Structure formats: C-alpha cells, structure tokens
C-alpha cells in the first residue's frame, strides 16, 4: 500500500510540474504592444499586414444579397435569405464578418499612426509620410465600407451609421463600455478627413498598384462624394474621378479583357489587393 501511495505522490508531483510549465513559460518571444513597433521597418510590416486582412469577400457578398443585384432562385435552400430580406440580427455571420474584419484593419492602422511618430528618425520623414498616408487611406476606406453596409440612408446626415474609431481603443474587462453608433454625417466627416490627410502626405510618384497611391485616393474620394450626394460632394466627385482617370487612363477592349484573365495590371486597374486565393466568390 505504501508503495502504491509513493507512486501516486510521484505522479501528482509530475502532473503539478507539467501544469506549471503550461503557464510559467519563458515570455522572451512575446512582443508586448509597447515594443511591437521600434522602427519604420516594423511599421511597414504592420501596414502590409493591414492590407492582408482587408475584407474581400464579405463586402461583395453583403452588397449582392442586401441590394437588388440578386433574386431568390427556385433551388434556394436558405442561403443569403436573412440579408436579402433584411432580417438581420446578432446571429447573422456575414455582416458580423464584415464588421469585425473592417474594424480589425482600423485597429491595426490606428496603432501604426500612434507609434510611427515615436520611432521615425528626422531623416525618414518621406518614408514616414508615405506609410502614414497609406494608413489614413486604409482607415478611411474601411470606415467607408462600414458606412455603405450599415447606414440606412446615405444622404441623410442624421441617419444612424457605424462607429467612428479614430484612435486605439483599450478595453477594460472589468469595466466594459460600449461605443454608440455615429451618424452618417459624422462618419462622412471622418472618412473625408482621412482621405484628405492621406492625399496631403502621399508620394505623388508612388505607382505600386498593390499599395494605395494618389490615383487610388482620388478614386475613393470620388466614390464617397457620390454616396454623400450633395452639390459640393458631387462637384468634388467629378474632379476626383477626372484626376484618377487622367492618372490611369481607361483601357481598350483587349487590355480590359486581360484584367480579368491574367495578373496583368498595366491597364486601367488603379488599385488591387494582392491576396492568396482561398475561396471562390
């Protein structure tokens, strides 16, 4: 009996040591938030990662289902009916995916915007400004996607919309506060401000179509102006669209066809997100 008890005690000690190893591990490989960005190379890696998590399928699907682009087919077995009939609630995954993905990008670029001034050297102003320009443009774009998906009346400034997040939000698990929805007017003010700031900082000679350029900012501003639908915004939309078209002329038939059949972006493609194919739309 004593022998069995001895083995039992040894077993319990071994289990205790194993459990301790599960939580008492070397934290040297964990990067805390304060030390995640130490130079502009780190900032650029965070920016590239932000491009990678831009929602791709969910905005297209949600727009198609909730708009008038589709109708229920005879063989439909429930796919997309909630969105198509606007019977949305917290259990609906598609708008939730769009919401979470967009705010994930916004959170990442907000962290870059906060930290980049701290780590950039005086000699790195040009590179810092370029990274900031892309970050502000990404933030404006994601707010615009949220505005399009969650605003009932685009041209009504008082209409409820999504949430403006223009800073890093720190959540306290012991004191949870919920952010309220902003109005359409407040969302548009934030979107326009971000694109204007991006335009003032962007390198006008940058031409990487897999990163945001001046032409891409012009194109985004033109779209925002159409949704805002005021005399001033429509006038600005025409000017911005003209600038984008002048920078990246409209393709002929052969070039246009190649945009969809090949990876050739020498035609009228202004901006493209480079992603590894993971699903079919």
Image (cartoon, helix red, strand yellow):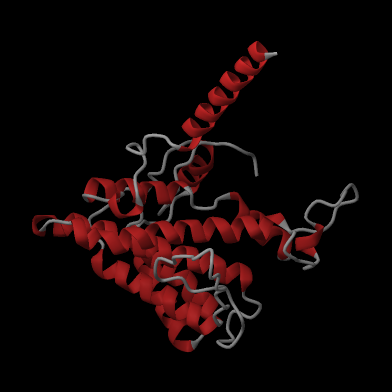
Apparent side of residue 76 relative to residue 38 in the rendered image (left or right): right
Q: Position of residue 279 (x, y in %)?
A: 62, 38
The residue positioned farthest toward the left in the image shown: 123
112 on left or right of 63 = left
Left or right side of 74 for 149 = left
Quadrant location of the C terminus? top right
Decide if residue 207 is in sight here.
no
Q: Quadrant of the N terminus?
A: top right
Q: Is residue 146 above or below residue 59?
A: below
How many labels sit on residues?
0
User: What residue is rendered at 30% in x and 68% in y?
Assistant: 199
Left or right: 247 as drawn, with respect to 126: right
The answer to whether residue 73 is visible is yes
Vertical arrangement, residue 22 with respect to residue 119, above or below = above
Which residue does the image show at 62% across and 75% down from the upper left? 151
Tell me what residue is drawn at x 41 percent, y 71 percent.
166
Counting from the top left corner in percent of width and height, residue 65 is at 73, 59
Q: Please, which residue is most extreme toward the right here?
A: 74
Seen from the viewer's position, the closer of residues 106 and 80 is 106
Viewer-closest of 245 and 234? 234
Q: Residue furthest top?
A: 3
**In the picture shown, does residue 76 fall above or below 5?**
below
Q: Position of residue 79 (x, y in %)?
A: 80, 51
Res 69 → quadrant: bottom right
**Between 40 and 6, which is closer to the camera in this rendering?**
6
């Amino acid at each position: 009996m004593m022998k069995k008890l001895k083995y039992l005690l040894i077993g319990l000690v071994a289990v205790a040591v194993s459990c301790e190893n599960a939580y008492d591990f070397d934290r040297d490989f964990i990067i805390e938030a304060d030390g995640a960005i130490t130079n502009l190379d780190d900032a650029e890696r965070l920016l590239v990662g932000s491009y990678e998590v831009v929602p791709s399928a969910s905005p297209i699907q949600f727009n198609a289902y909730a708009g008038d682009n589709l109708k229920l087919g005879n063989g439909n077995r429930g796919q997309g009916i909630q969105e198509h009939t606007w019977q949305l609630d917290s259990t609906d995954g598609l708008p939730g995916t769009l919401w979470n993905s967009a705010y994930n990008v916004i959170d990442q670029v907000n962290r870059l915007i906060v930290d980049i001034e701290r780590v950039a050297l005086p000699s790195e102003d040009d590179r810092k400004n370029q990274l900031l320009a892309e970050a502000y443009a990404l933030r404006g774009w994601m707010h615009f996607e949220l505005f399009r998906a969650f605003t009932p009346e685009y041209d009504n400034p008082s209409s409820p919309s999504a949430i403006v997040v223009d800073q890093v939000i720190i959540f306290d698990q012991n004191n949870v506060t919920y952010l309220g929805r902003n109005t359409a007017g407040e969302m548009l003010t934030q979107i326009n401000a971000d694109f204007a700031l991006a335009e003032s900082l962007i390198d006008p000679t940058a031409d990487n179509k897999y990163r945001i350029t001046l032409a891409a900012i012009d194109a985004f501003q033109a779209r925002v102006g159409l949704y805002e639908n005021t005399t001033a915004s429509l006038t600005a939309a025409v000017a911005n669209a003209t600038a984008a078209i002048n920078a990246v002329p409209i393709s002929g038939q052969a070039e246009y066809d190649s945009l969809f059949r090949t990876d050739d972006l020498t035609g009228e493609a202004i901006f493209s997100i480079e992603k590894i194919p993971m699903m079919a739309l």
